[in-house]
Amino acid sequence: MNREIETKELIERAMAAQKRAYVPYSHYPVGAALIADDGEIYEGCNIENAAFSPTICAERVAIFKAVSEGAKCIKKIAIVAGEDMGYPCGVCRQVIREFGKDAEIIVARNTEEYAVYRLDDLLPHSFGPESLKGE
Ligand code: THU
């Protein structure tokens, strides 16, 4: 798939997932969609909880769905948050680090307005699996 079409498709899928967000507490819906090394697209939305701390972000839902289906490497992830551009939280950046060190991270308002980052832009000097191996 052509790069730009792939990016727009991921943003559309993230926007569709955002509509399914369960956000009775924050009222801040987030959607994410990623393409993994298996060629599949996985979507996620944030899912909140009355006890607050069990809440999980959209990005991690999408990533954990992918990994639980056998994918190990995220190639590209699109994120749509609130009504404006919302950047991934620190925990999600660290989880992207684990499964998508070289992933493109697309922070989008819609299919026309988006910015593309690499993880190194958002999480410089990161700690990852190689750090534990002394590499
Ligand atoms: N949230 C995400 O889904 N992704 C992020 O990267 C930032 C925060 C969610 C968690 C919570 O449901 C709501 O946004 C407000 O923090």
Image (cartoon, rainbow, N blue to C red):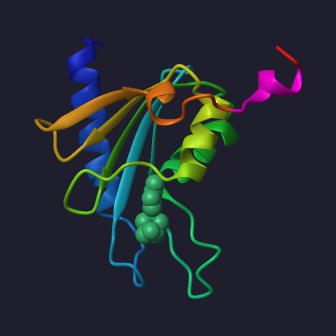
Instruction: State left or right for residue 118 relative to residue 110.
Output: right
Q: Is residue 36 above or below residue 26?
A: above
Whether the magenta-drawn stretch holds residue 22 is answered as: no
Give the quadrant of residue 8.
top left
> Going 28% across and 53% down the picture, which residue do you hit?
16
Is the N terminus in the top left, top right, bottom left or bottom right quadrant?
top left
Q: Position of residue 74 (x, y in %)?
A: 54, 27
Q: Please state the extent of the stretch shown in magenta in the rendering.
A: 127-133
| Residue 62 position in % (x across, y down) | 52, 46
Instruction: Give the residue displayed 69% in from the left and 31% down from the top.
Output: 70
The residue lying at 58 percent from left, 81 percent from top is 52
Q: Using residue 38 as the reference point, say whether residue 31 is left or right of it.
A: left
Viewer-proximal residue, 14 or 51?
51
Residue drawn at point x = 89 percent, y = 20 percent: 133
Q: How many marks?
A: 0
Q: Is residue 132 above or below residue 94?
A: above
Residue 115 position within the rendered picture, expressed as x and y whole percent measured from the top left: 25, 33
Q: Which residue ends up furthest to the right in the rendered image?
A: 133
- Quarter containing the C terminus: top right
Image height of 61 relative to 114, above or below: below
Q: Nearer the viewer, residue 121 or 40?
A: 121
Residue 45 is at least partly visible in this image? no
Residue 61 appears left or right of 107? right
- The one nearer the camera, 100 or 17, is 100
* Up/down of 133 relative to 21, above or below: above
Residue 37 x, y percent position in the rendering: 55, 20
Ligand 1 quadrant? bottom left
Residue 128 highlighted magenta (yes or no):
yes
Q: Residue furthest front?
A: 125
- Residue furthest bottom in the image: 50
Q: Is residue 16 visible to the viewer in this orientation of the structure?
A: yes
